[in-house]
Image (cartoon, helix red, strand yellow):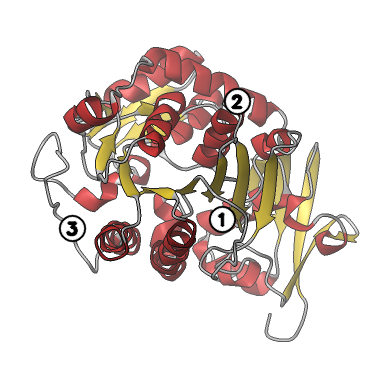
């Protein structure tokens, strides 16, 4: 009997790569995702396989799942420092209610469940590198607390289900996963640096000695599958055992792209704690270690992102004058994007004050605003999935008084 695997959050960057690997080994794969982060091009490719199914559903709402299951891979979570800082409630809900619902599915079907936590559980570590036994240095009311506490709850609840209900749980802690398939709008450090270098801009690094463990996507997916095949409870670190200084990463991206410059200075792009995992447990328990060099990984990421960027439209935004009073002088209201959703997510991430006027916490268009592409309301097209090409203008107009 072929494997029957349920992947929550499977429409995202890591999820689509994981699904592709699972399909390649002959599994039947069902993705549960509310698509709040949009549709990656890879999702359309996955849907060409008759062993793949997409269920549009928010995992924070219980899912009545009846089909047989071999394993559950629980990846569902908002990502990106800017997003999780601005949306702590939905982030905490994904880590709490979403985790409980995923665990309940695994419990009912007696299936192995692998839960993806985060290196953020270590906070601003006082120990380098971090072994799984290190309990971290976190601030429960800090700017990243929504994400950190969501992941800490995920680990605590997974452990509780294992102890009280005998659920076969496994926890992994990823460290800075990157690779082809990342969108230009992704504000994590590798994607942000590649986009700026391709545009010939400055890569500003804050604290060039700050260290990141950069794990290539194929290596990380191999670790996830190894965890699925084991009965190890975890948590297990999955990341590059040797860290890379941010300054060295910026220099490598610029030399690989062949354009851009590097300057040391203050920048939100590279803020955050220095983290590097001790991966001894992954080696000993899973027989896993990363094998992709950073040079190869950056080259593959660049090639993938260049293809996406070349397909993007230049998008200008026309917003109500009352909104512009909320923005800084001469606000940036132009970006490059492949879809309406990607454009609006860029706009609301760049100007968070506009977020409640355009997108709900679940990433959907709010009912009190209409967005037009030319003369067409995007709701009458394909909504946030409407593809953009060339040079376009998106016009936002209140749909009712008070919008």
Q: Position of residue 302 (x, y in %)?
A: 53, 21
Q: Mark 3 to mark 2: distance in Å?
A: 39 Å
Q: Position of residue 369 (x, y in %)?
A: 73, 72
Element under disc 3: loop
Q: Quadrant of residue 44?
A: top right
- Earlier-in-chain disc, 1 versus 3: 3
102 and 191: which one is in front? 102
Q: Residues within 10 Å of mark 2 (few under 14, many from 20)?
A: few
Q: Residues within 10 Å of mark 3 (few under 14, many from 20)?
A: some
Q: Mark 1 to mark 3: distance in Å?
A: 34 Å
Cβ atoms under marks 1 and 2 closer than 8 Å: no
Q: Work out which quarter of the rendered image holds the N terminus and state it.
A: top right
- Residue at image coords 61%, 61%: 66
Write down the residue under mark 3. Answer: 138
Q: Quadrant of residue 297?
A: top left
**Closer to us: mark 1 or mark 3?**
3
Write down the residue under mark 2. Answer: 24
333 and 372: which one is in front? 372
Counting every numbered tag in the picture gives: 3
- Earlier-in-chain disc, 1 versus 2: 2
- Earlier-in-chain disc, 3 versus 2: 2
**Closer to us: mark 1 or mark 2?**
2
Write down the residue under mark 1. Answer: 331
Is 215 located above or below residue 112 in the figure?
above
- Is 7 displayed left or right of 156 in the figure? right
């Amino acid at each position: 009997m072929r494997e029957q695997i349920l992947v929550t959050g499977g429409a995202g960057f890591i999820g689509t790569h994981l699904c592709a690997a699972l399909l390649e080994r002959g599994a039947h794969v069902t993705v549960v995702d509310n698509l709040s982060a949009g549709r990656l091009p890879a999702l359309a490719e996955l849907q060409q396989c008759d062993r793949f199914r997409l269920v549009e559903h928010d995992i924070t709402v219980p899912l009545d799942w009846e089909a047989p299951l071999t394993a559950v891979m629980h990846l569902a979570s908002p990502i990106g420092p800017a997003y999780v800082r601005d949306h702590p409630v939905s982030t905490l809900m994904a880590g709490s209610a979403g985790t409980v619902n995923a665990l309940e599915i695994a419990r009912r079907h007696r299936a192995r469940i692998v839960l993806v936590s985060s290196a953020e559980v270590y906070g601003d570590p006082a120990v380098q590198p971090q072994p799984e036994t290190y309990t971290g240095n976190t601030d429960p009311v800090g700017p990243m607390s929504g994400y950190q506490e969501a992941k800490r709850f995920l680990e605590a609840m997974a452990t509780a289900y294992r102890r009280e209900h005998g659920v076969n749980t496994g926890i992994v802690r990823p460290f800075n996963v990157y690779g082809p398939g990342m969108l230009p709008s992704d504000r994590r450090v590798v994607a942000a640096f590649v986009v700026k270098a391709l545009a010939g801009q400055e890569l500003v690094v804050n604290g060039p000695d700050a260290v990141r463990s950069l794990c290539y996507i194929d290596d990380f997916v191999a670790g996830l599958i190894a965890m699925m095949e084991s009965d190890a409870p975890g948590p297990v670190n999955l990341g590059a055992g040797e860290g890379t200084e941010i300054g060295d990463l910026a220099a490598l991206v610029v030399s690989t792209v062949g354009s851009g410059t590097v300057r040391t200075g203050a920048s939100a792009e590279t803020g955050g704690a220095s983290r590097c995992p001790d991966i001894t447990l992954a080696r000993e328990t899973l027989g896993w270690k990363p094998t992709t060099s950073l040079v190869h990984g950056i080259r593959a990421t660049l090639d993938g992102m260049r293809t996406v960027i070349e397909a993007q439209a230049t998008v200008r935004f026309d917003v109500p004058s009352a909104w512009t009073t909320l923005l800084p002088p001469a606000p940036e209201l132009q970006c490059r994007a492949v879809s309406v959703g990607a454009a609006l997510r860029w706009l609301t991430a760049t100007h968070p004050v506009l977020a409640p006027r355009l997108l709900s916490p679940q990433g959907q268009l709010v009912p009190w605003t209409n967005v037009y592409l030319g003369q067409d309301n995007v709701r009458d097209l394909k909504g946030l999935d409407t593809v953009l090409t060339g040079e376009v203008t998106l016009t936002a107009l209140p749909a009712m008084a008070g919008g």
